């Protein structure tokens, strides 16, 4: 009897130990992301858990010269003066941001855009391509932040007016007329009162304009840029009103406002002809515009967040 | 027996001092609710009862004041009051179970520069002037660069040179888990920096009161007048002769919006901005709005000149040139009207709007406010120790009630008339301050004017005030109240007739 009890005891001991070992092997592991962003020098690489890699790239082309109409609606320092009609001319290029396979067992995938399907609850499966092309634009004013494109943007922004009497009122900095604030209005939600309303939402400060002739002024210095809402377009372009404030030569505060029309410009920017890029300009040593980063983050989050891996499939 | 004996002695002593134990307890409960929003706890009531028995009731009341002023609830309640005054949202988790009044990070909320300025003034008992004069800011930095219209870091980047948050590669790398972080950022400006002025130069204030080409920052100026000088900018009353009334009001309120501003300008001989009744407000708003002129979107790198210009009831015309928002803020804090206004805010918050005070009392409070260095906790401690706060609720007689109701109606009249630019006897007359100044004959004349303008002897159909196009209309009920008030001799807040009934 004692012997049988001992054997039973030993059996239970061994069985119990095995069970706990098995349980330990089966303990839930923390979820891991499918991929991680890694910085190598100036490059951003998306490194996948299976060893594949994809590199963040940006491609553009030489800019196109476009213009918008500006109709003067107010001049507080010369209220009796006739209101003038202007145009603002600027260079703009499309930007293609793509995450391209750079290390893949299938050599044909190298240079292709990373894409995958993901399950969108209530909507079924959707295809996600890691690229940003729509309304991704580069302007001359962006070259301050992205000096690698300065050689593409050789022509500064320009204002062309029937009359520059309004500008000649302004004080000068050196040979240039100084506009202390050039603000753009938009219709946005006021977070404090939860109402949509017009508001000055972006501005360029201390903009310097130089008169090239009686009808044209070059923006020699786009000034300090304040564009918190989006950097997709320069802070001194608006689809509604732009508002220039400056001190005149009598040290009086002046405000000159223009009504702006962007409609035709938007149509041009969305045309297939405009959206062509030159593959020769592709770079990997890049910084992104903030607006681009936000959109790209939303897409790559599906890969880089451990919580989302279950919804990702057919990662090619 | 001993306890009964000592209780009787305490009762005798306190009664001799004019403080009944029951009244002390009532005051303490009121104190707790006023400062913390909650009644006394059981333990606190026991402490008070023991203190009263020991003849230390008053000292316990003072201890309560000091203790309550240090609580999270007090800080939160006063922050809410300030937010309501400034008319911004109060940042707090709406779920009471998650609410931590002090630890906002746990609430998952984002604190900006405005919030920290107000919190610091309250919790550190800084001078109330710091709401206008603070020049060092803290704010929580989003790790994820956001396209918020008024992101604090972007807002201060132009003036301070700190980098704007942008979508750099580093951000992309750091945000793999896509989690918010609440790392705190600081930005300091020199005290002499003319561009910086407390809450006025924070994203939340500037976004609450947005600038457009049309409003020219007059909206911000109007808020500053309302919050810091208690000037509500009610529209001035134009002349009431039939010929001018229509054209004047057509100018201010175009019929059905069919006229544009340009058309209105062209219709009048005078250039826009010189019409007398428009200028009643514009002469104040425009020079102050100009101070914000360059900061149309965010904080501009350069200060803008402007002026503080208004008519003070006590000082006459105020017209001081200022440079930058700080120049404006500093000048405002030097005005007696500012002190009066802030004192009135505290009075209304802690003693009550319905508890009228005389001009003499107001001056005493203003002096006390200065004496305590304009520190909110010290001034509140004074208010909640005052006889007005601790007085038993008054049972008012009919005339006293009538006076209060009449005063609240006449405030609408005074708010408009005080902004008039004409030489008008009604302009400097505070219709809500009883008794009216002067001898019996002068007061009789003033009441007669009200009777005639408001048709208080009739049914109101012949009244000439308020004007037909005024936003505020005198209702039938209000007409009856004023009529009864006059019939009773226009009693003051003590119920005493000012004139013969």
Image (cartoon, grey):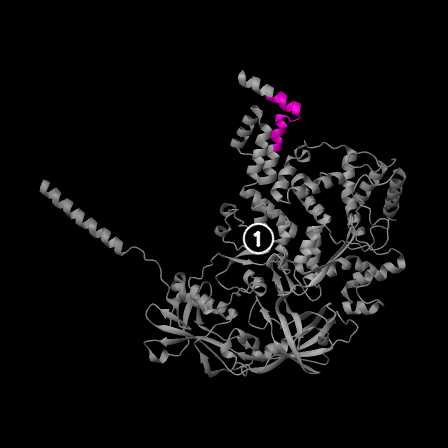
Query: In the rendered structure, the residue with mark 1 lies on which chain?
Result: B
**Magenta span covers which residues?**
B10-27
**Which residue is drawn at the image coordinates 60% and 75% (left, top)?**
A221
**Which residue is drawn at the image coordinates 53% and 56% (left, top)?**
B139
Q: Secondary structure at mark 1?
A: helix
In the displayed image of the protein, which residue is found farthest to the top?
Answer: B1
Does residue B162 appear anywhere in the picture? yes
How many numbered marks have been drawn onto this rendered protein structure?
A: 1
Q: Indicate yes or no whether the magenta region holds residue B26.
A: yes
User: How packed is label 1: few (under 14 Cα within 10 Å), some, or many (20 or more)?
Assistant: many
Q: Is residue A106 left or right of residue B242?
A: left
Residue A295 image position (x, y, % from top left): 49, 69
Residue A209 image position (x, y, % from top left): 65, 77
Q: Indicate yes or no whether the magenta region holds residue B318.
A: no
Residue behind mark 1: B115
**Looking at the picture, does residue B68 appear above or below residue B210?**
above
In what quadrant of the picture does the C terminus of chain B appear?
Answer: top right
Majority secondary structure of magenta residues: helix
Q: Quadrant of residue A219?
A: bottom right
In what quadrant of the picture does the N terminus of chain B appear?
Answer: top right
Closer-to-camera residue (B343/A3): B343
Residue B203 image position (x, y, % from top left): 60, 59
**Looking at the picture, does residue A192 appear above or below residue A211?**
above
Closer-to-camera residue (A190/A204): A204
Q: Quadrant of residue B34?
A: top right
Residue B188 image position (x, y, % from top left): 56, 58
Does residue A124 appear anywhere in the picture? no
Closer-to-camera residue (B198/B488): B198
Q: Is residue B75 left or right of residue B222?
A: left
**Looking at the picture, does residue A304 appear above or below residue B472?**
below
């Amino acid at each position: 009897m004692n012997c049988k009890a001992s054997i039973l005891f030993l059996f239970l001991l061994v069985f119990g130990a095995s069970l706990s070992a098995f349980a330990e092997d089966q303990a839930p592991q923390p979820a891991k992301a499918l991929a991680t962003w890694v910085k190598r020098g100036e490059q951003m690489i998306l490194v996948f858990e299976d060893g594949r890699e994809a590199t963040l790239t940006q491609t553009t082309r030489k800019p196109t010269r476009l213009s918008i109409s500006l109709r003067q609606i107010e001049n507080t320092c010369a209220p009796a003066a006739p209101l003038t009609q202007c145009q603002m001319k600027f260079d703009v290029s499309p930007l293609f941001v793509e995450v391209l396979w750079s290390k893949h067992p299938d050599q044909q995938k190298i240079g292709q855009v990373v894409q995958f399907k993901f399950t969108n609850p209530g909507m079924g499966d959707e295809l996600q391509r890691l690229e940003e092309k729509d309304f991704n634009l580069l302007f001359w004013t962006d070259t301050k932040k992205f000096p690698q494109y300065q050689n593409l943007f050789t022509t500064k922004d320009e204002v062309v007016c029937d009359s520059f009497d309004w500008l000649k009122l302004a004080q000068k900095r050196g040979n240039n007329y100084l506009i202390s604030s050039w603000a753009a209005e938009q219709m946005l939600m006021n977070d404090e009162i939860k109402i949509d309303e017009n508001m000055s939402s972006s501005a360029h400060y201390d903009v310097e304009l130089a008169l090239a002739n009686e009808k044209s002024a070059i923006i020699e210095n786009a000034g300090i840029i304040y564009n918190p809402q989006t950097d997709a377009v320069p802070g001194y372009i608006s689809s509604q009103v732009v508002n220039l404030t400056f001190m005149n030569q009598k040290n009086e505060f002046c405000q000159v406002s223009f009504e702006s029309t962007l409609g035709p410009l938007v149509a041009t920017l969305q045309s297939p002809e405009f959206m062509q890029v030159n593959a020769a300009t592709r770079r990997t040593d890049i910084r992104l515009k903030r607006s681009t980063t936000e959109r790209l983050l939303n897409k790559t989050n599906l890969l880089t967040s451990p919580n989302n891996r279950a919804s990702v499939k057919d990662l090619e | 027996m001993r306890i009964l004996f000592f209780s009787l002695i305490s009762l005798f002593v306190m009664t001799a001092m004019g403080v009944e134990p029951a009244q002390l307890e009532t005051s303490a409960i009121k104190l707790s609710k006023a400062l913390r929003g909650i009644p006394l706890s059981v333990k606190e009531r026991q402490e008070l009862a023991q203190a009263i028995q020991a003849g230390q009731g008053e000292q316990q009341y003072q201890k309560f004041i000091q203790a309550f002023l240090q609580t999270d609830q007090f800080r939160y309640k006063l922050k809410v009051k300030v937010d309501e005054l400034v008319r911004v949202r109060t940042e707090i988790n709406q779920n009471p179970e998650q609410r931590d009044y002090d630890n906002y990070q746990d609430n998952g909320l984002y604190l900006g520069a405005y919030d920290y300025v107000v919190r610091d003034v309250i919790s550190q008992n800084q001078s109330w002037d710091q709401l206008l004069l603070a020049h060092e800011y803290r704010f929580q930095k989003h790790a994820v660069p956001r396209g918020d219209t008024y992101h604090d870091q972007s807002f201060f980047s132009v003036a301070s040179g700190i980098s704007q948050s942008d979508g750099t590669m580093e951000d992309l790398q750091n945000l793999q888990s896509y989690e918010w972080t609440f790392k705190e950022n600081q930005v300091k400006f020199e005290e002499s920096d003319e561009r910086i002025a407390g809450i006025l130069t924070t994203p939340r204030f500037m976004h609450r009161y947005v600038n457009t080409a049309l409003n020219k920052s007059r909206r911000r100026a109007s808020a500053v007048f309302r919050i810091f000088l208690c000037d509500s900018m009610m529209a001035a009353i134009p002349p009431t002769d039939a010929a001018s009334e229509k054209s004047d009001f057509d100018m201010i309120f175009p019929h059905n919006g069919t006229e544009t501003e340009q058309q209105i300008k062209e219709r009048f001989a005078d250039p826009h901005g010189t019409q007398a009744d428009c200028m009643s407000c514009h002469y104040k708003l425009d020079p102050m709005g100009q101070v914000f002129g360059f900061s149309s979107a965010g904080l501009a790198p350069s200060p803008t000149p402007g002026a503080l210009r208004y008519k003070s009831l006590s000082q006459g015309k105020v017209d001081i040139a200022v440079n930058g928002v700080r120049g404006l803020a500093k000048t405002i804090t030097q005005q007696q009207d500012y002190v009066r206004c802030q004192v009135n805010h505290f009075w209304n918050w802690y003693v009550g709007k319905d508890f009228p005070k005389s001009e003499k009392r107001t001056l005493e409070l203003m002096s006390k406010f200065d004496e305590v260095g304009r520190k909110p906790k010290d001034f509140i401690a004074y208010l909640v120790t005052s006889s007005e706060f601790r007085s038993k609720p008054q049972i008012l007689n009919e005339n006293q009630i009538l006076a209060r109701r009449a005063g609240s109606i006449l405030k609408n009249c005074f708010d408009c008339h005080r902004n008039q630019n004409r030489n008008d006897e009604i302009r400097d007359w505070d219709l809500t301050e009883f008794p009216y100044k002067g001898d019996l004959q002068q007061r009789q004349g003033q009441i007669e004017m009200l009777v005639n303008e408001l048709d208080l002897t009739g049914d109101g159909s012949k009244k000439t005030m308020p004007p037909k196009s005024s936003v505020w209309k005198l209702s039938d009920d209000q007409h009856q109240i004023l009529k009864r008030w006059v019939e009773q001799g226009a009693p003051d807040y003590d119920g005493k007739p000012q004139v013969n009934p």
